[in-house]
Amino acid sequence: MADNQKNEKTDADRPGPDMPEASEELSVEEGFKRLDGLLARLEDRELPLEEAFALYQQGLQLVQQCSEKIDTVEKKILVLNGDGGFDDF
C-alpha cells in the first residue's frame, strides 16, 4: 500500500495554471505571474509539507528560467556611442 502512495501524484506534481510544462517556453512576465501563483499557494498554512516542497522546487525552476531570459536580454542590450558604434550596456 505504501508503494501505491509513492506512485500517486499530488496536485503539486502536475503542471497546472501556475506551473510550466518542462518544455514550455515562458515570457519573463508569465514566469513572474506563475511565481506569484506559487507563492500564494505556499502561503496556505494547511498545505502538506510534500506539496509545499514540490511547489518550492517548481518555483526555483521558474526563477532559473526567468533569470536566464533576463541575462540573455541584458547581453543583447547595446548602446550607440558617439562615434556611431555600439558599446555593451
Image: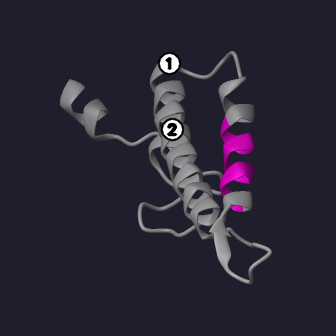
Residue at (53% x, 70% y) in the render: 25
Q: Residue furthest right?
A: 82
Q: Is residue 2 left or right of residue 8?
A: left
Residue at (67% x, 68% y) in the render: 77
Dot 2 crowding, Cα within 10 Å, few <14, some 14–19, many 20+: few
Residue at (65% x, 27% y) in the render: 42
Where, by quadrant of the figure, is residue 79 drawn?
Answer: bottom right
| Residue 88 point in image, percent of width and height | 62, 64
Q: Which residue is mark 1?
A: 49
Q: Which residue is mark 2?
A: 60
| Residue 63 point in image, percent of width and height | 57, 44
Span shown in magenta = 30-38
Can residue 37 be seen here? The reply is: yes
Q: Amino acid at mark 1?
A: Leu
Residue at (57% x, 63% y) in the render: 75
**CA separation in Å, label 2 and label 1:** 16 Å
